[in-house]
Image (cartoon, rainbow, N blue to C red):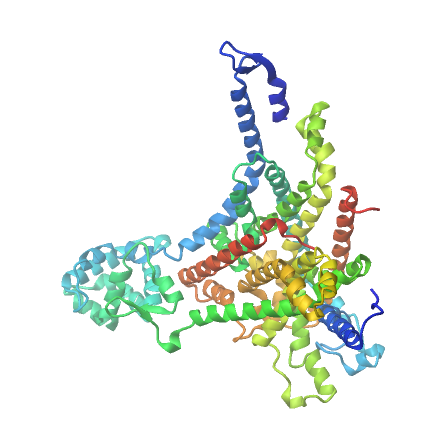
């Protein structure tokens, strides 16, 4: 966007000042995340740039924190745990959430508002309260400190995102397609897999991604419900920050930032594909 | 398809009374009703698994936890005879021998129970919430209670001085009921006085009300900061052509998608005494080495880090509202003679209010229950109510008080959510 020719000096000053303000805010958003990347290559156990790093002396840089990370049994276990729990919770919440969204988007669904309220409550209730409740309940039925317990807890936290994204996709879904399929003799199951599923798939996938990220990033419930065996990456970072603070967590953080850039790209591509499929934007 | 069935069955036949019927003779109205019920039922069947899952593994545990805030079985279970004997006690003088004899009978019986359903331990812990030292009185007495001989009153008073004090007996009488309000009384910084009335606690023992207020103030400050920083960039993004806007949107979405722990550790790296910001300021000579700024382990740290973490939640709703405001309105206002600031204030700004409301309530709801960031960068002065709830669950083990604090927080958040729903409706919740 260029500046209109009729701008007065005052307008021009404001025009540039506003841009400077905006870019400083973008800087505030990005800098803290990006600054960890060079710091994770620090040869010294500090959280700040050493003189060698600033003068770009190769001596100042090393991969020792990445070696630390890769060589650590507890970090490696936390990666396995995060993926195991994340995938388990995603499968469960995506299946249940998609089914529920299909029901909720039917016009004949009774008590829709109330049910929707209950289903998205895991997103509203402060995590500390959910975590405390689950801690007591899961202990009483002996699934605290088990993988099953953490997976169930994370699945509950992830379902609102699946329900909301899939319901949003179904809003623009043409219900007459289902009637057409039935008219042509397809069974409800066949209609679902051949007609409904391909069309709502972008919504389901992005809902699943949200559910996965929710689990992958979740720490409060893990603090309460998981045992030592189930420690996930955020849980390991939490002890890293609280107990022995070393730049290893910066190496982990860098890897996670790269992972989130990849995820961001996937979600953006899915969104564009969804819009194109539904004809919302010209190609 | 249920609907197809219904339509198939509809014929144009009529029965003897002239009502429309389907081909098999059922009245049309009934056939339609049945088809409708069936469709309702299938819709509900689809939702049922998730509903059951959420109710069992989410709603029920929370309800069960909230129940702990009023549940009060310990004294009733451990001292049934004593409570019976205490019924007519006036609370002015020490109870008489019959009460002590009942207490003796209760405690001897409790001591004989199998280890797994012990009552004495919980009794001591429960009484200790109301009266410190009560726990040691109970456990010390329990050790020798089976050897006590009449008169029991003297035996108990010899075992521990607390048995000779009115306070302990008042607590037993007051809390000897299956339900209690005492956790809420404590959560609101109140206590019972000698006459059993609820009064304020001493100044130096008041913790929770000021903590609730601090949580509200910090959340408001964070909401205000996210608004101040979010409004300009949302506006800027909404004026850019799509191509550039999508590109710059990455700056908002990347933090949104980055792990919370990563963002929190980023701020620890920046804000520590030996961190990047302090080093930078020392190196360019703005501050001396001895006067490094305390940016972390206080409220400043909590506000800075949480503003950064929650900013996307403000920008995204604002942006989606601003996208829908036609730029021609501002041009029209200016061509009608409004100065840019008047046009902004009277034409543009009022149209962004739904976005401000949505983003503001969202950020406020999230920050009021925040736990991780205050725990890591908040230090003592940046603690919020969630941290206190966690402390009572994990360290002090006063679960009733934790449940009472949690219930108060939950009611507050649900009220705010209701407000949010009134303002924008849940349908407009979008991510990314």
Question: Can you give x and y, in whole percent of width and height, for residue B46 in the image?
Answer: 59, 36
Q: Is residue B3 above or below residue B355?
A: above
Which is nearer the eye, B387 or B227? Answer: B227
Q: Position of residue B371 (x, y in %)?
A: 55, 64
Q: Residue furthest top?
A: B16
- Compared to residue A241, the image places residue B175 above or below, namely above
Q: How many marks?
A: 0
In the rendered image, which quarter is residue A231 located in?
bottom right
* Relative horizontal placement of residue B64, taking residue B165 as reference (left or right): right
Question: Residue drawn 55% across and 16% down?
Answer: B20
* Residue A256 makes an appearance in the image: no
Q: Is residue B195 visible?
A: yes
The part of the image, by quadrant, that contains residue B379 is: bottom right
x%, y% of residue A116? 55, 45
* Residue A184, position as x, y percentages in the image: 73, 23
Instruction: Write down the quadrant of residue B183 in the picture.
Output: bottom left
Of residue B321 and residue A80, the one placed in the foreground of this image is: B321
Quadrant of the frame with the N terminus of chain B? top right
Q: Quadrant of the C terminus of chain B?
A: bottom right
From the viewer's side, name the closer residue of A130 and B325: B325
Residue occupying the point 54% across, 31% down: B41
- Residue at image position (60%, 74%) is B301
Using the image, determine if residue B261 lies above or below residue B294: above
């Amino acid at each position: 966007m260029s500046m209109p020719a009729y701008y007065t000096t005052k307008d021009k000053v404001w025009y540039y000042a506003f841009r400077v303000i905006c870019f400083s805010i973008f800087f505030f958003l990005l800098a803290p995340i990006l600054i960890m990347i060079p710091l994770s290559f620090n040869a010294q156990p500090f959280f700040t740039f050493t003189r060698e790093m600033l003068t770009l002396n190769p001596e100042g840089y090393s991969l020792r924190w990445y070696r630390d990370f890769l060589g650590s049994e507890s970090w490696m276990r936390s990666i396995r745990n995060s993926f195991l729990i994340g995938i388990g919770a995603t499968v469960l919440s995506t299946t249940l959430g998609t089914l529920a969204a299909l029901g909720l988007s039917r016009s004949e669904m009774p008590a829709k508002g109330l049910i929707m309220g209950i289903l998205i409550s895991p997103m509203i209730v402060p995590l500390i309260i959910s975590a405390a409740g689950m801690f007591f309940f899961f202990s009483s039925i002996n699934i605290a400190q088990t993988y099953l317990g953490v997976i169930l807890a994370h699945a509950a936290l992830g379902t609102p995102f699946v329900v909301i994204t899939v319901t949003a996709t179904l809003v623009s879904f043409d219900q007459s397609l289902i009637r057409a399929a039935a008219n042509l003799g397809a069974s409800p199951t066949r209609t679902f897999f051949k007609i409904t599923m391909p069309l709502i798939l972008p919504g389901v996938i992005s809902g699943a991604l949200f559910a996965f990220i929710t689990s992958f990033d979740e720490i409060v419930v893990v603090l309460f419900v998981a045992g030592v065996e189930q420690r996930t990456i955020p849980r390991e970072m939490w002890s890293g920050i609280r107990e022995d603070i070393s730049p290893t967590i910066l190496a982990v953080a860098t890897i996670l930032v790269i992972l989130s850039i990849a995820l961001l790209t996937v979600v953006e591509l899915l969104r564009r594909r969804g819009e194109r499929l539904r004809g919302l934007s010209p190609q | 398809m249920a609907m197809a069935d219904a339509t198939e069955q509809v014929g144009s036949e009529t029965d003897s009374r002239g009502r429309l019927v389907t081909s098999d003779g059922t009245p049309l109205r009934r056939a339609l009703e049945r088809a409708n019920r069936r469709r309702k039922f299938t819709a509900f069947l689809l939702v049922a698994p998730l509903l059951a899952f959420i109710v069992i593994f989410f709603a029920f545990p929370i309800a069960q936890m909230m129940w702990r805030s009023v549940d009060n079985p310990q004294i009733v279970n451990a001292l049934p005879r004593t409570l019976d004997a205490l019924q007519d006690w006036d609370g002015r003088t020490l109870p008489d021998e019959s009460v002590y004899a009942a207490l003796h009978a209760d405690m001897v019986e409790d001591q004989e129970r199998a280890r797994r359903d012990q009552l004495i331990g919980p009794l001591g812990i429960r009484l200790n919430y109301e009266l410190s030292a009560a726990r040691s009185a109970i456990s010390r007495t329990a050790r020798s209670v089976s050897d006590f001989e009449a008169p029991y009153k003297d035996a108990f008073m010899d075992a521990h001085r607390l048995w000779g004090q009115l306070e302990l007996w008042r607590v037993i009488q007051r809390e000897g009921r299956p339900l209690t309000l005492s956790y809420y009384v404590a959560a609101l910084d109140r206590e019972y006085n000698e006459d059993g009335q609820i009064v304020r606690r001493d100044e130096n023992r008041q913790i929770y009300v000021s903590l609730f207020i601090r949580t509200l103030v910090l959340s408001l400050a964070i909401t205000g900061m996210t608004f101040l920083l979010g409004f300009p960039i949302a506006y800027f993004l909404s004026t850019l052509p799509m191509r550039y806007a999508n590109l710059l949107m990455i700056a908002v979405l990347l933090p949104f998608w980055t792990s919370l722990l990563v963002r929190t550790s980023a701020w620890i790296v920046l804000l520590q005494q030996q961190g990047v910001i302090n080093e930078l300021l020392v190196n360019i000579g703005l501050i001396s080495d001895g006067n490094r700024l305390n940016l972390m382990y206080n409220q400043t740290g909590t506000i800075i880090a949480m503003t950064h973490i929650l900013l996307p939640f403000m920008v995204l709703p604002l942006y989606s509202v601003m996208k829908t405001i036609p730029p021609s309105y501002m041009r029209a206002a200016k061509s009608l003679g409004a100065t840019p600031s008047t046009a902004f204030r009277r034409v543009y700004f009022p149209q962004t209010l739904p976005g401000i409301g949505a983003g503001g309530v969202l950020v406020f709801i999230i920050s009021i229950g925040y736990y991780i960031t205050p725990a890591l960068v908040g230090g003592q002065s940046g603690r919020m109510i969630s941290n206190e709830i966690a402390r009572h669950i994990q360290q002090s083990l006063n679960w009733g008080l934790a449940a009472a604090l949690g219930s108060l927080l939950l009611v507050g958040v649900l009220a705010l959510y209701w407000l949010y729903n009134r303002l924008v409706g849940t349908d407009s919740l979008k991510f990314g």
